[in-house]
Amino acid sequence: MSNYYIKNLEEYFQIYRKSVREPENFWEEIAEEHFVWRKRWTNVMRWDFSKPEVAWFENAKLNITENCIDRHLHIRGDKTAILFEPNDPAEKAQHISYNQLHERVCKMANVLKEKGVEKGDRVCIYLPMIPELAISVLACARIGAIHSVVFAGFSSLALATRINDCDCKMVITSDGSYRGTKTIDLKGIVDQSLETCPGIKSVLVVKRTGASIVMEKGRDQWLQPLLDKASSKNKAEIMDAEDPLFILYTSGSTGKPKGMVHSSAGYMVFTAYTFKNIFNYQEDDVYWCTADIGWITGHSYIVYGPLANGATTVMFEGIPTYPDHGRFWEVVEKHKVTQFYTAPTAIRALAKENLSFVDKYDLSSLKVLGTVGEPINEEAWHWYNNNIGKNKSPIVDTWWQTETGGIMISPIPFVTPTTPTFATLPFIGVQLALMDERGQELMGKQVEGRLCIKYPWPSMARTIWGDHKRYYDTYFSAFENMYFTGDGAKRDAVGYYRITGRVDDVIIVSGHNLGTAPIEDAINEHPAVAESAIVGFPHDVKGNALYGFVILKEIGESRKPENLRKEINQQITEHIGPIAKLDKIQFVPGLPKTRSGKIMRRILRKIASKETDNLGDISTLLNPEVVKAIIKDAL
Ligand code: PRX
């Protein structure tokens, strides 16, 4: 069909081959054709994974907001850029046109400047899914400030860690947020955080719920009166291609969260190009990604990728189950959504409900469906395909990471034949490798190994904020000259990739990346806890749920287990947030350890998954007897 950018599989392979054989020519053409630059690059790319150092479009000058907003004004100024659908269906949706978005971003940029925010400063954004979130992100980018969005479900301690790690100067938040029937006191959480964040000079507060909050004099101000006074003209700051655009934290398998730093030009080029091709976005389409802008999916595929293409992008404040399980489909019908991009966990949760929640609505506008964040199981894939896509909308199962900035493995809709549970083929320009444990690349088809990427792509993270060594150690030290993803994958007989899951200590729960270490640290701070180990186990809605094995100190032994369990989860909620709560907590006399003292999580994973028939050789453990005791009381 004529309006597909990549028309058939042959053309995909042709473009792919070019992108791999001549990556510089390939990306240069894309950059020239699709974007506006203040100054052209002098060199398309430079790389050295041993450092690691990567630069794209060197010495080019640009502002990403001119690409996402200004250049659309004369051709589609009145087109809806952001379509805001509130939590409560009774509240009216807002259609924010490109002209209005321009005005609102410029005003916000001027407010930030007036408050002393300068190019290179870090601004923490802790907001619900309301238009001001996208506007704040874009306003930071407009003045060259580095935004650090923290998902508004994180606790005050987690927020404080993230504010302090990158030395933010300002927080933008709201009086509260809506979640179904509940309201959450966001400002109260910020106030608590700021007790330990001396670097924060100002807090701007969006009025959303109207809850009564405390405003600290000299520090906190309502945003609206400042916007009312601000000029709607703002000249975008001219940025270098490699200037950091944002920091986004992701959990690691050890220690504190990693502030992944993304660049300006490479990130823009790759997110825009992937968006257009993977969702096959056409001018009158209404695209909806249900993620939160607090995660990378929202950064790349609610804000930057869609807006760089002049798209209409839906921002949804609510949850899939309020006022009932038909909410997603109601919104699809109401706004005639054409592309719908969500997480397998949401699909699994909705698939449990009666089909009448789906059948009530006209979903005929849908053209392309997508999934992201975790492997999708076959059953959920078929439910999505049959009931939402009516067997006519291709499902793009997109594999990527906070670190990759954009989609790396995905079908091209209407082009790549899909197979349930397979993310299929590498996206254009992406060079994958599967490695065995000895560091050899597995060649050919039908192999399984550790998923690596052997050549830079424009939107890869450039470093971890303040810790370049950790960036190297985490991603580039396992295999020489390769970026190691932390995932395992299979390549089948036709060359399709299927992600098998994490091979490190990161657990994906409901599509959220959770490191075991920070959760264990939180548990271990409980006065009754001596030691703990967390593993994932299969869960029919969340994909994985968390199982904690906890050794108590003597003071814990005398207390009621139910109370302790509650307190431990409370402790986790305070340190990280409710997303990291444990589904099961087993009190154990000891943890299986190697002779060097390392916890054997492999064994704990098997116990948690009730697969204790074949535990392998446990005789080399320091304390093999403990395994029996744990199995006996397993939950
Ligand atoms: O394990 C993979 C899983 O999510 C991890 C990345 O998580 P995060 O940085 O939070 O980014 C999520 C949104 C891009 C990956 O290492 N993952 C992501 N997408 C898929 C997936 N696993 C299987 N299939 C996917 N489509």
Image: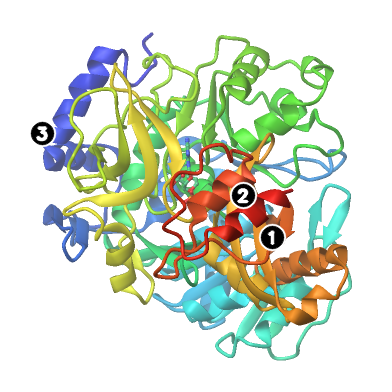
Residue 489 drawn above or below residue 486: above
The residue that disc 2 covers is 292
In the image, the residue with mark 1 has its CB under 8 Å from the nearest atom of ligand 1: no
The answer to whether marks 2 and 1 mark residues whose Cβ atoms lie closer than 8 Å is yes
How far apart in space, not on screen, are marks 1 and 3 (Cα)? 44 Å
Residue 45 drawn above or below residue 347: below
Q: Tell me which numbered mark, 1 or 3, is placed earlier along the sequence.
A: 3
Residue 232 seen in this snapshot: no
Q: Amino acid at mark 3?
A: Arg
Nearer mark to the viewer, of 2 and 1: 1
In the image, the residue with mark 3 has its CB under 8 Å from the nearest atom of ligand 1: no
**Crowdedness of circle 1 by 10 Å Cα count: few (<14), some, many (20+)?**
many
Element type at mark 2:
loop
**Crowdedness of circle 2 by 10 Å Cα count: few (<14), some, many (20+)?**
some
Across and down, in percent, residue 395 comes to 51, 22
The quadrant in which the N terminus is found is top left
The residue that disc 1 covers is 153
